[in-house]
Amino acid sequence: MTYLEGFVVPVPAANRDAFREHAEQMAGSTQSFGISRQVEAWASDVPHGKATDFYRAVDAKEDETVVFAWFEYPSKAARDAANEKFRSDPRMAEMPPPPFDGKRMILGGFEAIVEQGSSTGSYIDGFVVPVREGKRDAYRELAEKMAGVFRQHGAVRVVEAFGDDLSHGEVTDYFRAVNAEDGEGVVFSFIEWPDKTTRDGAWKSIMEDESNRPQGEMPFDGKRMFWGGFDVIIDTAQAKAAETVNA
């Protein structure tokens, strides 16, 4: 299955265009490093939570929003090789400073445990979830079921990935983001939709359908899970598809 490098980034709201330009410049190099897809998605419908949320995850300031992003690789080995190229390629040192505080960005490696669909979407639901290591199989089973529900309601792709290369940061990290307890891992997941209208209609139908309500004990603490909706502003897979059509 796909291997992901998942990111949550604090970006001043006024820097949207500058961030897109920076991401586009980065994309020119990432594809040559073996990254099969780069997606950058700008906060659109991201709520503030009582215990956790995307803003707290990166200690966002009043004038900042968040970007939910990921790189896709065919394997962890490909990801590790790409990171070596990042560190050694002189183009990285020549890039201008990013239009955000990199010290508060969180990132890590995640192995996909559920992957349904293969199309790309223009709107993303992103999730970060604390899951106890012993509940991994139970979580996968529930995630597979719900992925099918989302697909039936118009989602074009659903991915759930379990963190297997996450570090503890000095300022922010995925563990702090979900207030992880001993023995818990972190899941980075997303649903790709054709557009926000499809997404909003799907969630309304899903929430109104009593058959979708969870039965029994959940394999994660939903009070510490956080989520939000994001507009895709960079997607190298869509850019490649457009180039092919116009060739």
Image: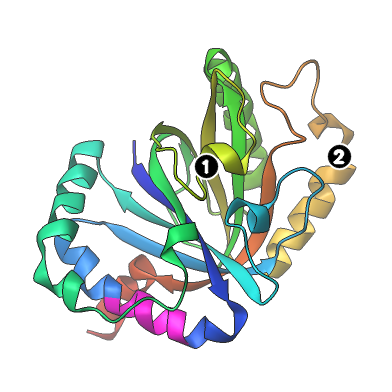
Mark number for residue 209? 2
- With respect to residue 221, does 5 lie above or below? below
Q: Is residue 113 visible to us here?
A: no
Residue marked by disc 1: 174
Rendered image quadrant of residue 141: top right
Which quarter of the image is occupied by the N terminus?
top left
SS at badge 2:
loop
The magenta stretch spans which residues?
Answer: 18-25
Give the SS element for disc 1. Answer: helix
Q: CA distance from mark 2 to mark 1?
A: 32 Å
Classify the position of the C terminus by image quarter.
Answer: bottom left
Q: Which three-letter amino acid code belongs to the residue tagged 1? A: Tyr
Residue 244 higher or lower than 127, as above or below = below
Residue at position x 52%, y 18% in the image: 133
Residue at image coords 76%, 61%: 200
**Magenta-drawn stretch, dominant element (helix, strand or loop):** helix
